[in-house]
Amino acid sequence: MDDRDPLSISRRKFLIVGAVSATALALPPFICAQASAANAARPIKATVALTVNGQLRNLDLDTRTTLLDTLREHLLLTGTKKGCDHGQCGACTVLADGRRVNSCLTLAVMHEGSNITTIEGLGTPDQLHPMQAAFIKHDGYQCGYCTPGQICSAVAVLGEIRDGIPSHVSASLTDKPQLIASEFQERMSGNICRCGAYSNIIEAITEVAEASA
């Protein structure tokens, strides 16, 4: 093989070029990993003001802290549950300015100045929210793990319908949606109940809807 031929390459040179290329490709991820570790060791903090269940709370938080972890770990409001932690089960649902959100998918700093309502803020054992009472009456809670998110979502569902917000099953995009089971089922579809208490949950929502119509 003629090394002077630009199209030819010896086995030795081929191995050298391959080794150099492999090193070059491996180096950046290693450097990035070191940089990420250094950044993780120096969290950026911010003061976040939230009104939670009617009480103003000023919190010094790592800017990466989710709303869910803020409620559970910093404010000790453990009624809000951590389920899948991917926004797929609805167990972490809370109300932010009256709208339901998956608190595991949103950062606390994104809700600066917001009014947050958790299951603890809806009612008390001595004075239950109508939706809480209906869930108990119709056995819509079963094991109870998903229940806080279910109830918060159900309260928001009735608010959405009364505000005229259509869903995929609404007959019209302009007419006000009806307080009917198909609307409740569609809007509650993001809240998973592994006990299978769906029919009982719909009965509870229906009772509250009819009582407040």
Image: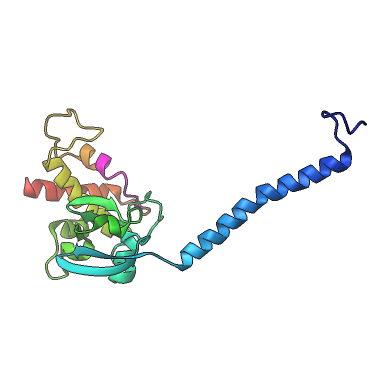
Report which quarter residue 137 is drawn in. Answer: bottom left
Q: Which residues are magenta?
A: 185-193
* Display coloring: rainbow
> Where's residue 7, x and y in %?
82, 28
> Where's residue 186, x and y in %?
27, 39
> Where's residue 209, x and y in %?
12, 47
Q: Is residue 34 magenta?
A: no
Q: What residue is at 34 percent from the left and 52 percent from the top? A: 193
Quarter containing the C terminus: top left
Q: Is residue 40 above or below residue 190?
A: below
Q: Is residue 165 above or below residue 52?
A: above
Quarter containing the N terminus: top right
Magenta residues, dominant SS class: loop
Report which quarter residue 81 is drawn in. Answer: bottom left
Q: What residue is at 11 percent from the left and 67 percent from the top? A: 127
Residue 120 in sight in this render: yes
Report which quarter residue 76 is drawn in. Answer: bottom left
Q: Nearer the viewer, residue 139 or 190?
A: 190
Q: Residue furthest front?
A: 4
Q: Nearer the viewer, residue 75 or 41?
A: 41
Q: What residue is at 18 percent from the left and 28 percent from the top? A: 171
